[in-house]
Amino acid sequence: MLSHPITILGGLLLLHAAYSTVHYRTLSATVTPPADVIIEVSIGFLLALLGSISSLSLKDVREAGVAAFVGRDFDTFNHRQRPKRK
């Protein structure tokens, strides 16, 4: 259950990086954000991603009870190309 605080922390880091960028743009006329904002965005994105991935509850394919290729959907492939002559 550590996934939700990690996701929230990542989101807060992203919000703080956005606020820092807006504040920096009001003080300076440069186009590129400072390096600490780029690092903060990267860390915030990774934390939010890891938190959301770790909260998933995945099942094993064998335990799901669904047989693969049940229908005849994957048996043939029809297209409109003429057969090649040899």
Image (tube, rainbow, N blue to C red):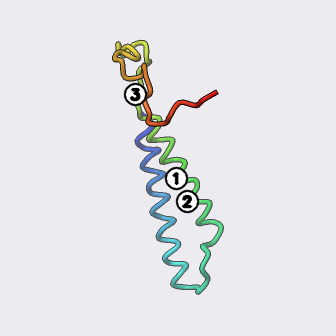
Residue pictured at 64% horizontal, 27% vertical? 86
Residue pictured at 63% horizontal, 65% vertical? 36
- Mark 3 to mark 2 CA distance (whole Å): 27 Å
Looking at this view, is 53 or 81 the one in front? Answer: 81
Element under label 2? helix
The image quadrant where one finds the N terminus is top left
* Tag 2 near tag 1, CB within 8 Å: yes
The answer to whether residue 24 is above or below residue 37 is below
Q: Residue furthest front?
A: 85
Q: Which mark is residue 17?
A: none
Residue pictured at 37% horizontal, 23% vertical? 73
Badge 3 or badge 2: first in the primary sequence = 2
**Residue 59, image x and y in percent?**
41, 21
**Residue 46, image x and y in percent?**
55, 48
- Mark 2 to mark 1 CA distance (whole Å): 6 Å
Indicate the quadrant where residue 39 lies: bottom right
The residue to which callout 3 is attached is 57
Dot 3, crowdedness within 10 Å: few (<14), some or many (≥20)?
Answer: few
**Residue 38, image x and y in percent?**
60, 63
Element under label 1? helix
Horizontal side, residue 31 vs residue 66: left or right: right
Residue pictured at 52% horizontal, 47% vertical? 47
The residue to which callout 2 is attached is 41
- Mark 1 to mark 3 CA distance (whole Å): 21 Å
The residue to which callout 1 is attached is 45
Dot 1, crowdedness within 10 Å: few (<14), some or many (≥20)?
Answer: some
The amino acid sitting under disc 1 is: Phe
